Amino acid sequence: MRSRTTDPLHRTDPIYAAIFVIPTLAVIAFIAFWPLGQTFYNSLFKFALMYPQNKIFVGLSNYGRLLQDSRFLNDLWNTIRFSIWSVGLETLLGMFVALMLNRKFKLRGLVRAAVLIPWAIPTVVSSQMWRWMYNDNYGIVNNILLSLHIVKNPVVWLAFPSTSMPAIISVDIWKTTPFMILLILAGLQMIPGELYEAARIDGANAWQRFWSITFPLIRPTLGIALIFRTLDAMRVFDIVYVMTKGAANTETISVYNQWTLFTKGFIAPYFGYGSSMSVMIFLIISIFAFFYVKTMKIKLD
Amino acid sequence: MKRSIILTLALISILVFSSFAATLVMTAGAVGREYVVLQQQIKVFEAQNPGIKVVLMPMPNSSTDRYNLYVTYLSAGMPQPDILMLDVIWPPAFANFLVNLNPYFSKDDLNDFFQGAVNADTYNGKLVAAPWFIDAGLLYYRKDLLKKYGFEPPKTWAELIHEAQVISAKEGIKGFVWQGASYEGLTCDFMEYVHSYGGAILNEKGQVVSDSAMVKKSLQTMVDMIYKYKISPVGVTTYMEEGTRHIFQNGDAVFMRNWPYAWPLLNGKDSKVAGKVGVEPLPEGTGFANVRHSATLGGWQLGINKNSEHVKDAVKLIKFLLSPEQEAYKAIHAGQNPSRLSVYNNPAVIKANPFYKSLWSVFQNAEPRPKSPIYPQISRILFTNVNKALTKQLTVDQAVANITSQLKDLLGQ
């Protein structure tokens, strides 16, 4: 310790360290913790956005009411269904395509770039585009199904619970699989080729090579990708809002939250209740993140 | 895509222009031709008032989305937008954020406006907005097809169903398209059926009276049009105004329920049904007392943001847009019904929209939706349950029972 402090190049000066770290912490506190704290503070009151002076302190009772709100519980289940299906299929598809794109073939660069296109389109635009593609009269999806004689009458995808959730999930899969591909591909490229050579010499087949080399080595990347995607999926708003506005039992917790905060909480005393819902969504997502970090053994430091 | 570019440009120009003195920011709709027409009007206004610049902010088509945007602007206490285009059902909710316009309009002047709209804009004795144009639900029909099969325009829902069934089967097109998606427009459509059968959701004292045979019959009629008579495609449960207009304008439907804005578009150069369209009042119900032809009162108002820094200039612009000449221009080019009674005597307006004269009583008697600051919540109970019945998630009886119990819950009855 002493030798370090006397050496001017390696001296650790807590004061300098603090000076350099404080701006970063201040920015994080300002953009992340302050709004979160404010939301939590709001969630302890009963008030309308229009009458902020009429705040009544109600403690944690908003949270109690939330757990008895059947619409919230139903929407939570919708959100979980959406997340499991979309993230699950995106991961499988993403892995599959990434493994293919990791091989050497002609025009690989071009294909890799092309794969990213759905992800580059703003979600609101692609949701609107898909809404038209699902249209029962002029939509291309029905057009194809009718001309292939798979269906007799056009399917109104976004009208019924049985078809609208799968329709929305497939849009998310179409849109976000490229993100998965990108991350997994990055993980695959970090695996040294010698490992595969050695495995081949030892007589391991493709399946064994995947499970003994590829999978363990991309697991941390996969874990990060899953955290990103699950967090995104749990707070899905834009696709649902544009495509169905929550009709046909597709409402997710974020869509309900938006309605509570804006439409209802503007004039009726539900802004605090809406804030408690926002905090709850944050907590639920944190639980998922924690679960991933533990099971995937990701080192965050 | 195009609209988001326009919106971005508008926002940038707001930032640029706000450094100068009198720049008015005004929200504007972009359904049909209204946005282009308004741009022309603004050009004239700016030429007449060299000191004032006007920046238009196009708003989303869905009324529900606009409401959410206004909540953001107004609750943040922003001075802009200065002028807000408000749906006829919003003045009670936004009253506290709007300038009282009473001092700027004389009694005589106000008497020239549709009284239903003036009532909707008056809250707690204050005129918080001024009526800009009137909307009423109308029945559009294919004149050529009705003539071909020897039918008269339908007077009752039963006649409409019969005519639609016959013609759509022979022509291989859809019978009747209307707004059935889960949003505000469905509340408007539903209220027309309820009133046409002589029913009501809230009575004059504001009590919930939706548990009635008339309301059940209304909803049953809507459901049967889709599944029993098959005159409406299942897709109506996802259509808003423009979705239905595209089908009708493409020649793919015999009847359509829509607002007056569709008229100039249906008769435009790119329309497949130009000159073949007629307009009538919506049919009435049968089998109950008090059955009538009913149209929901719609329309848009202009209000001034209380925090605006240019209230005087904003009043100038509103008065300009509500002047008889400008209302006539708007009626002729955008098909939006003037809010002033005197404009209906203008021959040029009647020539462009002949149905203004024949359907005068429809506009005059258009029925308002409940007037309440929590209207959006009332409406949501109606349109979600009706949409669930239309998509067979609920039976008609269950949906009506839900509406009744949820409304009683909301209104504390």
Image: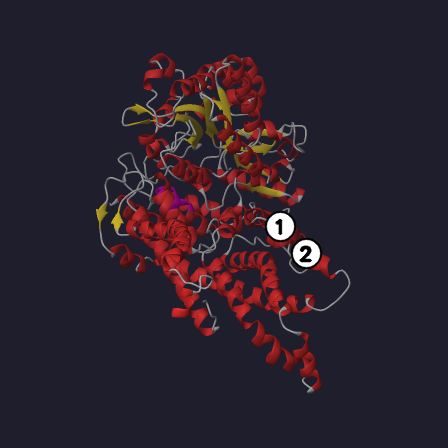
Residue B379 forms part of the magenta stretch: yes
Which chain is disc 1 placed on?
A
Q: Which residues are magenta?
A: B377-383
Residue B188 position within the rendered picture, expressed as x and y whole percent measured from the top left? 44, 38
Left or right, residue B305 beside residue A109: left
Which chain is disc 2 placed on?
A
* Residue B228 visible to the viewer: no
Label 1 close to label 2 by CB (< 8 Å): no
Q: Amino acid at mark 1?
A: Met
Instruction: State whether the magenta stretch is mostly helix, strand or loop.
Output: helix
Q: Amino acid at mark 2?
A: Ala
* Neighbourhood count class around disc 1 (C-alpha, 10 Å): few under 14, some 14–19, many 20 upward: some
* Residue B116 visible to the viewer: yes
* Neighbourhood count class around disc 2 (C-alpha, 10 Å): few under 14, some 14–19, many 20 upward: few
Residue furthest out toward the bottom = A202
Residue B294 position within the rendered picture, expressed as x and y whole percent measured from the top left? 43, 32
**For mark 1, what is the residue?**
A133
Nearest to the observer: residue B258 or residue A240: A240
Q: Nearer the viewer, mark 1 or mark 2?
A: 2
Residue A262 position within the rendered picture, expressed as x and y whole percent measured from the top left? 38, 43
Left or right, residue B271 beside residue B305: right
Residue furthest out toward the front = A6
Image point (43%, 51%), residue name: A255
Left or right, residue A56 beside residue B61: left
Residue A204 position within the rendered picture, expressed as x and y whole percent measured from the top left? 67, 85
Nearest to the observer: residue B155 or residue B195: B195
- For residue B255, above or below residue A25: above
- For residue B236, above or below residue B134: below
Circles 1 and 2 on the same chain: yes
Which mark is on residue A113?
2
Q: How is the image coloured?
A: secondary structure
Which image quadrant is residue B167 in?
top right
